[in-house]
Amino acid sequence: MSKSTHFFGQPVYGQLIKALDHDKIVKLSRKNGGERYVKSFDGFTHLLTMLYAVIMRFDSLREIEAAMTAEVRKLQT
């Protein structure tokens, strides 16, 4: 049985993150006033969190928080 050539060796979430342009997203967020009172949780981080929640099919903020807490070592860059 041969290996598939269509799999890049990364999860879908990782592939999606690589396709996003951090600077462009933050620039759009600032243009629309989304970065006005931001200290650490900027628009790009919020987008990544919401994409993760959608992909994992979470229904509540509690589920998102619990999953992020469990994966904190993987999320730190």
Image (cartoon, rainbow, N blue to C red):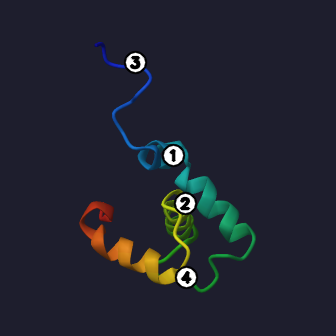
Q: Which of marks 2 and 4 is in front?
A: 2
Compared with residue 12, is residue 51 higher up or lower down, i.e. above or below? below
Most distant residue in the front direction: 1
The numbered mark, 4 or 1, whose residue comes first in the sequence reads 1
Q: Nearer the viewer, mark 4 or mark 1?
A: 1
Most distant residue in the bottom direction: 37
The image shows residue 44 at horizontal and vertical percentages of 54, 64
7 sits left or right of 58 in the view: left
Mark 3 Cα shell of 10 Å, populated few (<14), some (14-19), many (≥20)? few
Residue type (three-letter) at the residue carrying disc 3: Thr
42 sits left or right of 68 in the view: right
Q: Marks 2 and 4, how far apart in space?
A: 20 Å
Most distant residue in the right direction: 32
Q: Marks 2 and 1, how far apart in space?
A: 9 Å
User: Badge 3 is on which residue?
Assistant: 5
User: Badge 4 is on which residue?
Assistant: 38
The image shows residue 66 at horizontal and vertical percentages of 37, 78
Q: Is mark 4 on a helix, strand or loop?
A: loop
The image shows residue 29 at horizontal and vertical percentages of 67, 67
Based on the displayed image, in which of its 4 quarters is residue 27 positioned? bottom right
The numbered mark, 1 or 3, whose residue comes first in the sequence reads 3
Q: Is mark 3 on a helix, strand or loop?
A: loop
Residue type (three-letter) at the residue carrying disc 1: Leu
Q: Does the image show residue 40?
A: no
Residue type (three-letter) at the residue carrying disc 4: Val
Q: Is mark 1 on a helix, strand or loop?
A: helix
**Callout 2–callout 1 Cβ contact below 8 Å:** yes
Residue type (three-letter) at the residue carrying disc 2: Leu
7 sits left or right of 49 in the view: left
User: Badge 2 is on which residue?
Assistant: 51
